[in-house]
Image: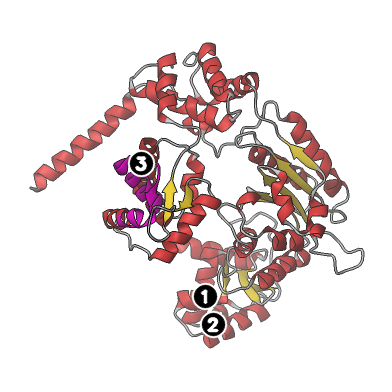
């Protein structure tokens, strides 16, 4: 028995080794990942320059001024990329000039409440600060204390602010942190990233007035611009001669419909993966077509990744039920039955109806993945009906199962 | 052994090594701070499995003798070894190399 286990272990190691020995077209696949920010951002130079000019004053007159800049634009237009790129530059300039300026980037989709955002900022300064047991007011005092006592200047980016639950208090408090003292030093500047300016109407008047200007608006990328982005990234990610100009044009034109650079890069990465699997050292148009059928622009992987484990299971239950029933809508009670089965499959303790209902509302309003409506006249009682219109169920199921198995 | 990175050569106020390592509790606290750089009191109490009064007494002794720095933000207190002093840096190197 033992011998058999050892020999199967050797066999699988050999298989791994064999796969590793195969030639690959990727020089560095990670350069195509959504988390990678390249040193050059093609067609975003002007926006980056605008941002730098806005923040010039905090370098020239440290601790004397603060800035609030709003960056808006559709998905995949480089909002996060220019903010992170600016952050890197700011850090190196501050270091060169011996200035105590810090840059911190918070994703409001992952940190959706006032407390979570403050905790995230504070922990970036001191990891030893206990992360539980403090009210938002206390956390704000701790942050203020850190900045004042250590003479630190913070440039904070609040990314994807649209997803935050209640935006007014944090924006008000952070923009007026040093308001109580007369002509006092300034310690914090804000960069706010959102898809559009509609969230401003939800804020109170005084906060809205401080945030409206300046605003940097990013437009969707054109096919030519996407081509340049892909060409630049290709140099870093692939060996030369593996991706032709025509392929890049094909991907750029396909993605231009959405103007989304993230989708274009994902398409290129998946097409590369398909070519690699076939041991082909050149990406062909057919590889791009296969990649296109495998990924869907409406399925935002980063959104699925940010869901909680329970929400992923619930969404998977909705997907499986819709697939099985072959209807446009499914009832919440049917989804919950399916949910219980999937919970068992993944060895997860199923939550009760109220939590599930809240999660379903969250999937609809915050993440925009599903749609719900209340059952109509011809049915007894009132039941929530759930539907998914935008994304193919097959791909969603595959993606969710993969994510659940990984976590 | 030469320690660089802006550490001053000596610290006048550093207590003798015999006093510094005179109890198991003190060694435990110094070892943890050498390993984790910064800790709050709850973390120290949990990791050393000592009671908070004992930990507090040791921490007070270390702070008074400039072995440990106490930072206070709001009602949070954070402790770290004062590694800007040569002898303390040596102590940290000793603890981290022992493992």
Q: Which mark is residue B44?
A: 1
The chain holding disc 3 is A
Q: Nearer the viewer, residue B33 or B93?
A: B33
Q: In the image, what residue occupies the spot 58% across and 84% down?
A: B56
| Residue position for label 3 | A327
For label 1, the SS is: helix
Disc 2/disc 1 C-alpha distance (Å): 7 Å
Q: With respect to residue A77, does A328 lie above or below?
A: below
Q: Nearer the viewer, residue A41 or A265?
A: A265
Q: Nearer the viewer, residue A134 or B36?
A: A134
The image shows residue A385 at horizontal and vertical percentages of 42, 51
Colour scheme employed for the rendering of this structure? secondary structure
Residue at the far front: name it. A378
Q: Are marks 2 and 1 in contact (CB under 8 Å)?
A: yes
The image shows residue A275 at horizontal and vertical percentages of 39, 20
Q: Are marks 1 and 3 in contact (CB under 8 Å)?
A: no
Q: Which mark is residue B55?
A: 2
Q: With respect to residue A362, does B74 lie above or below?
A: below
Q: Is residue B86 left or right of residue B47?
A: right
**Which tag is nearer the camera, tag 1 or tag 3?**
3
Q: Which mark is residue A76?
A: none
**Which tag is nearer the camera, tag 3 or tag 2?**
3
Label 3: how many Cα within 10 Å (few below 14, some 14–19, many 20+)? few
Disc 1/disc 3 C-alpha distance (Å): 58 Å
Quick one: label 2 or label 1, which is nearer the N terminus? 1
The chain holding disc 1 is B
Whether the magenta-drawn stretch holds residue B94 is answered as no
Q: Inspect this view and state whether residue A102 appears.
A: no
């Amino acid at each position: 028995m033992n011998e058999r286990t050892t020999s199967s272990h050797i066999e699988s190691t050999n298989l791994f080794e064999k796969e590793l020995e195969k030639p690959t077209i990727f020089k560095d696949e990670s350069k195509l990942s959504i988390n990678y920010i390249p040193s050059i951002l093609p067609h975003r130079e002007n926006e980056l320059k605008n941002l730098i000019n806005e923040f010039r004053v905090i370098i020239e007159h440290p601790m004397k001024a603060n800035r609030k800049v709003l960056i808006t634009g559709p998905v995949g237009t480089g909002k996060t990329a220019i903010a992170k790129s600016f952050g890197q530059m700011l850090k190196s300039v501050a270091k060169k000039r011996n200035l105590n300026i810090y840059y911190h980037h918070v994703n409001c989709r992952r940190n959706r409440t006032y407390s979570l955002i403050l905790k995230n900022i504070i922990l970036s300064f001191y990891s030893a600060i206990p992360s539980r047991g403090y009210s938002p007011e206390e956390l704000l005092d701790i942050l203020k204390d850190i900045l004042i006592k250590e003479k630190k200047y913070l440039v904070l980016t609040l990314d994807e602010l649209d997803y935050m639950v209640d935006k007014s208090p944090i924006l008000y408090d952070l923009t007026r942190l040093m308001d109580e003292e007369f002509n006092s030093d300034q310690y914090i500047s804000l960069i706010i990233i959102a898809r559009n300016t509609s969230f401003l109407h939800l804020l109170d008047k005084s906060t809205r007035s401080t945030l409206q200007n300046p605003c940097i608006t990013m437009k969707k990328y054109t096919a030519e611009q996407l081509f340049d982005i892909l060409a630049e990234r290709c140099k870093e990610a692939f060996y030369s001669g593996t991706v032709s100009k025509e392929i890049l044009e094909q991907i750029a034109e396909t993605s231009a419909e959405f103007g989304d650079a993230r989708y274009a890069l994902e398409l290129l990465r998946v097409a590369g993966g398909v070519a690699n699997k076939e041991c082909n050292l050149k990406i062909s148009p057919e590889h791009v077509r296969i990649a296109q059928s495998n990924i869907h622009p409406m399925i935002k992987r980063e959104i699925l990744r940010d869901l909680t484990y329970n929400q992923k299971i619930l969404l998977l239950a909705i997907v499986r039920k819709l697939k099985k029933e072959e209807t446009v809508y499914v009832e919440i009670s049917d989804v919950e039955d399916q949910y219980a089965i999937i919970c068992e499959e993944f060895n997860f303790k199923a939550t009760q109806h109220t939590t599930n209902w809240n999660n379903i509302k969250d999937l609809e309003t915050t993440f925009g993945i599903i749609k719900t409506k209340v059952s109509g006249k011809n049915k007894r009682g009132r039941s929530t009906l759930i539907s998914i219109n935008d994304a193919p169920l097959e791909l969603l199921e595959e993606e969710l199962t993969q994510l659940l198995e990984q976590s | 052994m030469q320690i660089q990175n802006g550490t001053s050569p000596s610290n006048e106020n550093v207590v003798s090594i015999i006093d510094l390592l005179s109890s198991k509790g003190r060694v435990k606290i110094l070892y943890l701070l050498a390993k984790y750089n910064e800790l709050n009191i709850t973390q120290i109490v949990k990791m050393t499995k000592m009671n908070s009064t004992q930990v507090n007494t040791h921490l007070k002794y270390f702070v008074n003798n400039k072995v440990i720095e106490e930072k206070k933000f709001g009602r949070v207190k954070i402790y770290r070894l004062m590694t800007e002093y040569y002898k303390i840096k040596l102590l940290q190197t000793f603890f981290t190399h022992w493992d």
